[in-house]
Amino acid sequence: NAGVTQTPKFQVLKTGQSMTLQCAQDMNHEYMSWYRQDPGMGLRLIHYSVGAGITDQGEVPNGYNVSRSTTEDFPLRLLSAAPSQTSVYFCASTSGTGGLGYTFGSGTRLTVV
Amino acid sequence: SQQGEEDPQALSIQEGENATMNCSYKTSINNLQWYRQNSGRGLVHLILIRSNEREKHSGRLRVTLDTSKKSSSLLITASRAADTASYFCATDARDLKETSGSRLTFGEGTQLTVNP
């Protein structure tokens, strides 16, 4: 099993550009989440999903969109990149049955110039 | 806002010593989880303790939870150089109703350095 796969691993964007960060999991997990990690601030929740067709906002959703058309995929879209979105982005998933930890992807390091 | 707050922010010990990290949180939880992150890598789940549990063990890891004080501790015994990493606590305040989903809230982490 691949677990949680994130692409790309690195990306440089110019201010105002848009892009999609991909996240796929092969564990049939219902719950999927996107976090950003900034130095000294831990991980902050951007958006999350409890199943296909259902998404909700986390702590820092502004400037990001998500969709969940399948159980496996949970892409994160940056609508108009800003330097404040320079960060490391992590996708994570877990089973909806509860009592289990999250499986994290290896991250996407995004720089907006 | 950060739910969990780890203490200390950084810890440096010698190989073979024990390492203790603490986590405090603010609201009611269903469970509390600890994760490890090696430099430049993703997070790896270490252990989960439910709100009705007080202590849990996994190999060299021992986690305690005190819901009355809203605090948890992670003890790593007989530390090794390979334990050098950042350690995060995360609280899961998942509502029992399915519609609310699962939301992990992380602290800022403890940087552990184990010197050979």
Image (spheres, helix red, strand yellow):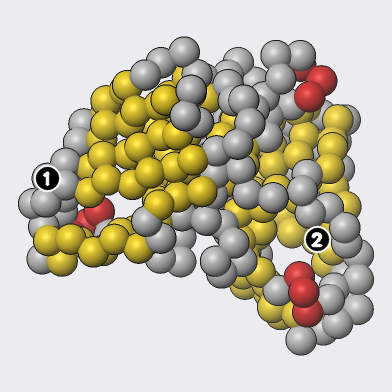
Please give the name of the residue rendered at 16% of the width and 47% of the height, measured from the top-left corner: B18
Question: Residue B85: x and y, percent?
Answer: 34, 58
Q: Quadrant of the C terminus of chain B?
A: bottom left
Seen in the image, is A104 located left or right of residue A20?
left
Residue at the front extreme of this rendering: B69
Q: Amino acid at mark 2?
A: Thr
- The percent coordinates of residue A73 (x first, y second) are 74, 41
Identify residue for label 2.
Answer: A20
Q: Quadrant of residue B84?
A: bottom left
The three-letter amino acid code for the residue at tag 1 is Ala
Left or right placement of residue A62 versus residue B21 in this view: right
State left or right for residue A31 relative to residue B55: right
Pick the front one: B111 or A29? B111
Identify the residue at image location x=56%, y=69%: A39
Residue B107 appears at what percent x and percent y? 54, 49
The residue that mark 1 highlights is B78
Q: Secondary structure at mark 2?
A: strand
Kindly indicate whether the residues beneath marks 2 and 1 are on one polypeptide chain.
no
Asked whether residue A3 is in view, the answer is no
